[in-house]
Amino acid sequence: MVRRLEFTQPSLKGKLEVPGDKSISHRAVMFGSVAEGVTTISHFLEGEDCLSTIDCFRKLGVTIEQNGTDVKVHGKGFAGLTAPNEVLDVGNSGTSIRLLLGLLAGLPFEMTFTGDESIAKRPMKRVVGPLRQMGAQISGRDDGNLVPLTLKGSALTGIEYKLPVASAQVKSAILLAGLQADGETTVIEKERTRDHTEKMIQSFGGEISVDGMRISVRGGQTLQGGHIYVPGDISSAAFWLAAGAIVPDSEITIESVGLNPTRTGIIDVLREMGADMDVILDKGTGSGEEIGTITIRHSQLHGTTIGGDIIPRLIDEIPIIALVATQAKGQTIIKNAEELKVKETNRIDAIATQLGRLGAVITPTEDGLIIEGEQSLRGGKADSLTDHRIGMTLSIASLLADGPVELENEDAISVSYPSFFEDLDRLLS
Ligand code: S3P
């Protein structure tokens, strides 16, 4: 579907709570399903990706009641899950497939996973490799790298695995498999990535040890259901933080947003670029996740260099950071971000090409982007492709364009932020 975006001298003002965190919503359903007892989830993200996770667990025999952002999962324990008689279709969701491959690898039955045209291109070997080392039997195209993948449950043994890429999905898949493996499973991180899995194992009563970059779990643990409140997704809030910073005469406050330090690289970068911003920590969610309020006002920003261990802390925010950089004084360089190539699209290409269609001057590099500052943006056609974050970045860009933007494939946005355009309207009025 195509959406026409046309604004005259917009300014964004007001308070907003963004939808629940995607990473935490997925995990709450996953842990709730394999735990004993009932898990209630509030402020769940009703986006397509997380609904795909619910759908997969229903096919595995779990009763899940979903009423908007309230979800009740009737946990069955690992042993209570049953063989699905349909293919598990994860849609666009990399987190669903990668974490489920780990979580389900030790179950005594067979299942097949598939997904949409974007998932069909995304590498699964990064999880299939270590899971095979643990004893998992996984087959599929390109020696088990590409969907459809078939997992034949088998007994697992704990391993020690040094992550070759900074990926929370790979880390989580191995730790989740470790919960069912014989002995101890240890993952050694290359760079610190989002730690929602570690936090959630603890809030479901499990034991996990984190010693610097070494994270270990013991097999054979029983998890206990409970209540999970999902904070607002900082990766969704990032679009309003960016808009507040670059659209003249704007002031936006985002309340109840997750501020887990493994996710707040966007705040550090905006501060470094000179944003006028206040961040106030609230008292936490009760499940170990930090939460707070951010207010941002329009100001003149300057370019920066982004690379090294901050990259995993803002990997999903790079499309919108690239847009912010087009409005800053001077050049911005993003490096060490080769992981962008295996996201919902090859984001290095997608950012340069699609923002380029609106007049931005962005050079793709092997591991990132070079973005020229103080660019005037123009109207025209641009495409979300199969990528929600590209779609939202282009929508924010349209606020600065000198003519209408025709956004192709706008429906991609519903993967993580179905109410994005309603929230935009609210801030414009
Ligand atoms: C996620 C981890 C990140 C991120 C994705 C969600 C997660 O992927 O890009 O949107 O929930 O663990 P990688 O682990 O591949 O970096």
Image (cartoon, rainbow, N blue to C red):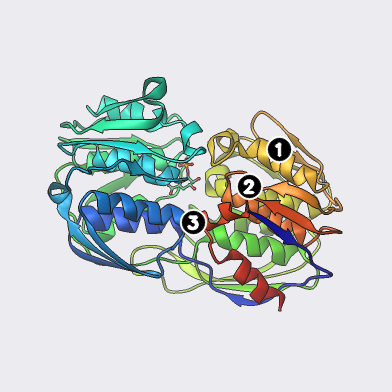
Q: Disc 2 beta carbon < 8 A from ligand 1?
A: no
Dot 2, crowdedness within 10 Å: few (<14), some or many (≥20)? many
- Picture quarter containing residue 24? bottom left
Kindly identify the amino acid type of the residue bearing the numbered disc 3.
Pro
Looking at the rendered image, the quarter that the C terminus falls into is bottom right
Write down the residue under mark 2: 318
In this figure, which residue is indicated by the disc labeled 1?
Answer: 369
Q: Quick check: is the Cβ at mark 1 less than 8 Å away from ligand 1? A: no
Closer mark to the observer between disc 3 and disc 1: 1
Tell me residue 289's x, y (percent): 40, 63
The local secondary structure at tag 3 comes to: loop
Residue at x-position 66% and y-position 28%: 366
Amino acid on which disc 1 is placed: Leu
Relative to the observer, which residue lies in front, 34 or 164?
Answer: 34
Name the residue: 67% across, 73% down. 425
CA gap, disc 3 to disc 1? 24 Å
- Residue 214: x and y in percent read 34, 39
Q: Earlier in the sequence, mark 3 or mark 1?
A: 3
Give SS at disc 1: strand
Residue highlighted by disc 3: 261
* 64 is higher (above) or lower (below) than 335: below
Total marks shown come to 3
Residue 279 appears in view:
yes
Q: CA distance from mark 3 to mark 2?
A: 17 Å
